[in-house]
Image (cartoon, grey):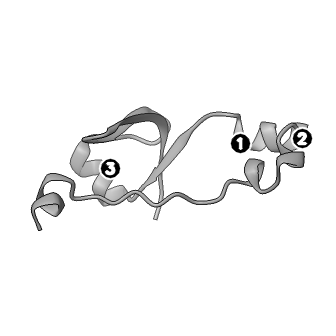
Amino acid sequence: PELAKKYPLMAVQRKLARSVHSSHGMNEWILEVQRNQPNVLIHPEDAQTRGIKNGEWAVTFNDRGEHRAIAVVTT
């Protein structure tokens, strides 16, 4: 309960198309689709509460560090 108050959102990592298998890492079409940029998916309600807009850089963090990524606002 203490951590839930401090960090109300949970991060869940998903498997990316570009890293399904190491042999796909340099396929041009995967790099084009993924743009080789980090992203973080966030629900529209959570994004609005935090002033995060789709396509903008956002920072996710906890006591161990932070991750800068492009926000993808989606349900």
Q: Which residue is mark 1?
A: 34
Q: Find the distance from the CA under tag 3 to the CA under tag 1.
A: 21 Å
Give the label, 3 or 1, closer to the camera: 1
- Residue 27 numbered mark, or none: 2
Give the label, 1 or 2, closer to the camera: 2
Q: Find the distance from the CA under tag 3 to the CA under tag 2.
A: 32 Å
Q: Who comes first in sequence, dot 1 or dot 2?
A: 2
Q: Find the distance from the CA under tag 1 to the CA under tag 2.
A: 11 Å
- Residue 47 numbered mark, or none: 3
Q: Who comes first in sequence, dot 3 or dot 2?
A: 2
Q: Position of residue 6 (x, y in %)?
A: 14, 52
Judged from the image, the secondary structure of the residue bearing numbered disc 3 is helix
62 or 58, which lies in front?
A: 62
Q: Position of residue 40 (x, y in %)?
A: 48, 47
- Residue 5 numbered mark, or none: none
Three-letter code, disc 2: Asn
Give the label, 3 or 2, closer to the camera: 2
- Residue lying farthest to the front in this orientation: 64
Left or right of residue 40, residue 24 in this image: right
- Residue lying farthest to the bottom in this orientation: 1
Q: Residues within 10 Å of mark 1 (few under 14, many from 20)?
A: some
Name the residue at 79% across, 37% down.
31
Q: How many marks?
A: 3
In the depicted structure, whether residue 22 falls above or below residue 74: above
In the depicted structure, whether residue 27 falls above or below residue 4: above
In the depicted structure, whether residue 55 falls above or below residue 42: above
Name the residue at 28% across, 58% down.
9
